[in-house]
Image: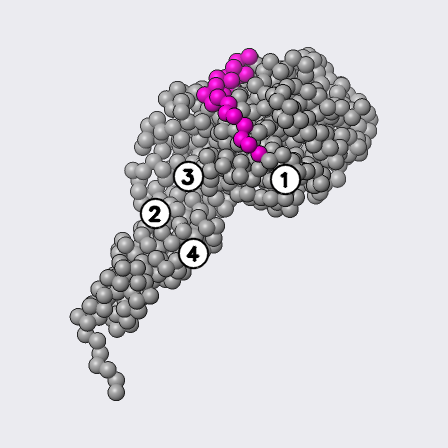
Amino acid sequence: MTPPPMTPHEADGLHRQGLVAAQAGRFDEALDRIGRAIAAYPTVPVWWANYGLVMESLGDVAGAANAYAGALNLDPSLEMAMDGLLTMAEAVRRAGDSARAEAFFRRAIALNPKTLAAVANLGVLLRAQARRAEAVTLYGRAGRLDPANWAHPYNLGNALAEMNRLGEADDAYRAALALAPGRAEVRANRATRVLAMQGRAEEALAEIEAVVAQHGNVDSLHASRLYLMQFVPGLTMPAIAQAHADWGARYPDRPAPAVAAPAPKIRIGYVSPDFRAHPVGFFLEPVLANHDRTAFEVVCYANTANPDWKTERLMAHADHWVWTTGMDDEALAQRIQADGIHILVDLAGQTFGNRLPVFARRAAPVQATWAGYVGTTGLPAMDYLISDSRQSPPGSEGWCIEGVVRMPDAYVPWAPPEDAPAVAPLPLATRGHATFGSFNALPKLNAEVAALWARVLGAVPGSRLLLRTPGLDDTGTAARTLALFEQAGLDPARVDLRGGAPHREFLAGYGEVDVALDPFPYSGGLTTLEALWMGVPVVTLGGDRFCARHSVTHLASAGLSDLGADGPDGYVAKAAALVVDPAGLAALRGGLRDRLAASPALNGVRFTRALEAAFGVMWQRFQAGQGRASFALSFD
């Protein structure tokens, strides 16, 4: 016999009994009672939401999300249900399930398009996946839903800057500042992501220094200041070194943690935000691939927010891989100590995403900085700076907190891109005029560089200058760049500007360049290696700071030290001399790739054996209680 239908009062009673059971921790009973109430009367949104709460308590994320969505289908304005659905979205996002998080956020938006948190958080999620165009749309929508909140135009500015839409990014940052004048993170990101990227390093530095003056306890602001100082020609090495030391003095060194002696392997920890298609990723891969696994065990601590194909390659070469983006500094330091790391290597220095506060905690007995920065970190707990004799010539120890380790060849190795196009014929031979070029990032461009390059073109009638780098397809940035050369006395009609492109296409652009011109005081690093690989010689000025001498060391590795100039006059003369001898330049172009391939710069095994020898010296000195010291290695 069919039981009589449940009355609304009876169903509500069951629902209430379910709530009591849930409060007592009897979740299965709660599900049964609330579920029976819903089965009898499925149109009560609060019952669905409470069913979701019980499912959430049981750890059933999908079930909870479905129950919350069921409530919202009945009442899109039910806040407890929307809060629950968004909580589930955040839970799966934190667990690394971006696809499910996106689905939950989109479901929330579909159920209530005016749900600000869902719109804004989906934008953050998509931007983290480099889906920036979609994120821009969502940030704009969030701004319209919540026009008084500075965070929405700020997020919009960040996404636009990452897309190299610098003028629009500046407008967005300014809009955020109009809503929240003086907001430190907005001012800082505008300085580093817009002003610096438009070749306005001095303005960017001035802005950062103003923010640091008000927020002196924020390490990321100090890092931006110290990094930007490297780009400004008027600053001296004593001033730059002192600024780093002043920052580092905030963090006195600590005693070394106890760690078991190598038995028999030395445990090396590499720490970086740039385990990806970034110069650090390209420099590190030959080392990870060639480490002697009988003597060394490698752990990579990845603070990499946007992993890519290079990340996968690096992961394949590591013995252990630890994602650190969710760890605070103390937790990461404790993890490194628990892992028994003997030598911890920083690959970021004072650049974005660094974990220098972990090094300040003395996470390992020996700590060194290498490849990711341009000189001293300023940190007393950093024992060594891994360099070479050209990057750090005799006497440069005075600019470093660390002991300087001089590698026998270059300070980094390199593996050329496997898909690089073939070297193109000399453009001068068919065009009838010389084309000078630079594919370096815009922060390296300044008025002094523009003036010297204008002199080069003045010395070679009919010559042209080709600049190619992300950001130059932004109309305002292109106009600023041309104005810089016009102020230097060069007709802007002689300057061709190209923006970013996929890497293979970017490299193919060297087919239009006869001679590359190196900027200063921040020289080309990976850019110079790529130019040489594509058959284009690079003329460099060098200088007194680490970042000024990247090309000096790469040219020396290729046996091309004569392309380094002693001063501006020599720079102009060397660049002009190369293009007045088309036959000689064509011969040089045709042999550059083989020359570089045979050089120490591309010998990953040789470099890694030297690096391992350096690690061995570091560890021996530590065991002997000798402390840090500068030393050089040699294959002689």
Identify the magenta region: 238-259
Quote the CA–CA distance across marks 2 and 1: 41 Å
Q: The N terminus appears in which quarter of the rendering?
A: bottom left
Residue at 68% from the left image edge and 29% from the top image edge? 616
Disc 4 residue crowd, few under 14, some 14–19, many 20+, Cα 10 Å? few
In the drawing, what numbered circle is on residue 117? Answer: 2
List the residue tagged with mark 3: 156
The type of residue carrying mark 1 is Val
Quote the CA–CA distance across marks 4 and 1: 37 Å
Quote the CA–CA distance across marks 2 and 3: 15 Å
The type of residue carrying mark 2 is Ala
Residue 431 in sight here: no
Task: Name the element at disc 1.
Answer: strand
Q: Where is residue 136 in the image (x, y as percent from the top left)?
A: 43, 43
Mark in the foreground, 4 or 1 = 1
Snapshot quadrant of residue 597: top right
List the residue tagged with mark 1: 298
Residue sticking out furthest to the bottom: 1
Q: Is residue 550 magenta?
A: no
Q: Earlier in the sequence, mark 2 or mark 3?
A: 2
Task: Name the element at disc 2.
Answer: helix
